[in-house]
Image (cartoon, rainbow, N blue to C red):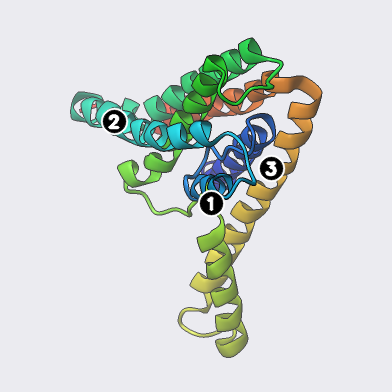
Amino acid sequence: MKDHEDTILALIAGYVDTLGFVALFGLFTAHVTGNFVLIGAEVAGVGQGALLKLLAFPAFIAGIASSSVLFKFLERDHSAHAASALYVFQAVLLVSFLATGLAAAPITDSTASMVLLCGVLGATAMGVQNARGKLLRTPGLPNTVMTGNVTQVVLDVVELIHRGTQGAQGPQVMQRLRSTLAAMCGFAVGAICGAVMYVRFSFAAIALPVAVLLFLAWQARAWAPASK
């Protein structure tokens, strides 16, 4: 399961990001670039929910900062728990995202206080996921934004066509290509499922990624080395 962690996290990112986009006036919870584009569109008078998207930026930063503080605190004396705690922290934030989304329903006003709080919590949760890989300093793929992964896939395919799989770097390039394609497929599947599940179950659909995160937290705790 650990070998497929990036794919699972990409699926979660696609799921939550698309659910937020469908439910919250085009809000991207998993990355801020898309929100900047949408804010620009709103300035031109062709969008809605500018305040919601503006608040997502500091919320995303808060998710990164708070996860860093939590990780550094635990890393000193409970290193075995640090990676697991990040999953639990994200899961708690997503539960809050779920609860505020249900409380805000039906969502018709992008400036309603409960809608704004819902968007902030979703962006904070995904800020935690974005920070996780850098805090753990483990090799892995970007799992919340696929632009870099698409670039890498194209470069690897051209490299394999040019040099084949028998060269010194061939096996490494092939392995990276498989992993990157798996993450991209995971994100795509997550995006489709997030939209479909929201249409069927509203914000209760967030329970699914929460369950997966709690499973990953248990797994990280079970596989962690003993505490210092």
Q: Mark 3 points at which residue?
A: 191
* Picture disc at residue 37: 1
Q: Which amino acid does label 1 sit on?
A: Val
The mark that comes first in sequence, 3 or 1, is 1
Task: Tell me the SS state at disc 2.
Answer: helix
Q: Which of marks 1 and 2 is nearer the N terminus?
A: 1
Q: In the picture, residue 160 is in which quadrant? A: bottom right
Amino acid bearing label 3:
Ala
Nearer the observer: mark 3 or 1; the answer is 1
Give the vertical position of 60 relative to 201 (above or below): below
User: Within 10 Å of the Cα at label 2, are there few (<14), some (14-19), or many (20+) other Cα atoms?
Assistant: many
What residue occupies the far right of the structure in this picture?
Answer: 200
**In this rendering, does residue 88 appear at all?**
yes
Q: Residues within 10 Å of mark 1 (few under 14, many from 20)?
A: few
Between discs 3 and 2, the one toward the N terminus: 2
Q: Is residue 98 above or below residue 46?
A: above
Residue shown at 61% from the left, 45% from the top: 45
Label 2 is placed on what type of residue? Answer: Phe
Q: Quarter of the image holding residue 206?
A: top right
Please tell me which residue is depicted at 55% across the width and 26% down the height of the picture: 215
Q: Which residue lies furthest to the front in this view?
A: 45
* Residue shown at 57% from the left, 60% from the top: 180
| Residue 213 vertical position relative to residue 168 in the rendered view, above or below | above
Q: Position of residue 175 (x, y in %)?
A: 55, 65
Foreground label between 3 and 2: 3
Task: Answer left or right for 225 relative to 213.
Answer: left
Give me the C-alpha separation between circle 3 and circle 2: 29 Å
Whether label 1 touches label 2, CB < 8 Å: no
Disc on res. 71: 2
